[in-house]
Amino acid sequence: VFEAGVGYVFGKRGEKRKSVEDLKLPKNFEFLQDTYLSLMVVMAPLFLVTVLFAGEDFSSKLSGDTNYIMYAFLQSIQFVVGVYVLLAGVRLLLGEIVPAFKGIAMKLVPDAKPALDCPVLFPFSPNAVIIGFITTTIGTVIAMFLFPTIGLAMIIPGILTNFFAGGTAGIFGNLTGGLRGAIIGGIAHGLFITLLPALLVTVLSNMGFVNATATDVDTVAAALFYAWIIGPLMKAF
């Protein structure tokens, strides 16, 4: 919802709107139209750069007998394989399991509608997922360095959150504002999903939970709503 709003405000609409899915890549880069290869192109450098910054001494504790650079590369592949398994499972749920349970659902909970998590949208707009993931990651990295300068906690970017939340948000940013909406909205989304956990750190610290926070927007929003509105109202009455 947040990125859709930002995309609507800053993106292009109507005939000027250029969808991410309409992008034509040069022949040498046509392989990037495959979602998993695109994800690999993003994840491999991300893992390798991170492990080089961490250094051999630290990384070798995790990699064991495997070369630490090769270990990081294999971890990036494992991430992509995990996403493939996830999306294959989504297609399986949509194609076979959901219809199989429909008869039971009609008996137990009439008029119920089956629902799945956000990855159900990924196959319909794969380019927007990659754009949303990349731009959200950029936004979270900017926020990681920016927020401590204004007195907030430093929140380390979470790759899973950036991919699933950012990829889903990228789809909606593209729908409301096209390519520009997806890019600007994605960076704003990265700042947004880092700001909320940073604010929650302060709230939880006042409750005695030092250096603790949560990442999911719904969880953080509920906690902040309680701390800022419900809690004071309860104390007042």
Image (tube, rainbow, N blue to C red):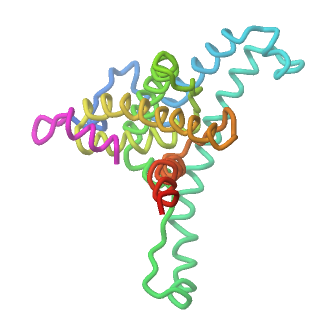
Q: Residue at x 57, y 52 (%)?
A: 88
Q: Is residue 137 above or below residue 15?
A: above
At which x and y percent is residue 200? 55, 39
Q: Is residue 138 magenta?
A: no
Q: Furthest residue to the left?
A: 15
Image check: 18 left or right of 115? left
Determine the image quadrant of residue 97. Answer: bottom right
At which x and y percent is residue 75? 70, 28
Q: Residue at x 40, y 21 (%)?
A: 29
At which x and y percent is residue 118? 48, 52
At which x and y percent is residue 93? 56, 64
Q: Main secondary structure of the magenta part?
A: helix
Q: Which residues are magenta?
A: 1-17
Q: Furthest residue to the bottom?
A: 107
- Between 150 and 35, the residue placed more toward the observer is 150
- Between 154 and 126, the residue placed more toward the observer is 154
Image check: 139 left or right of 231? left
- Between 176 and 191, the residue placed more toward the observer is 191
Q: Is residue 11 magenta?
A: yes
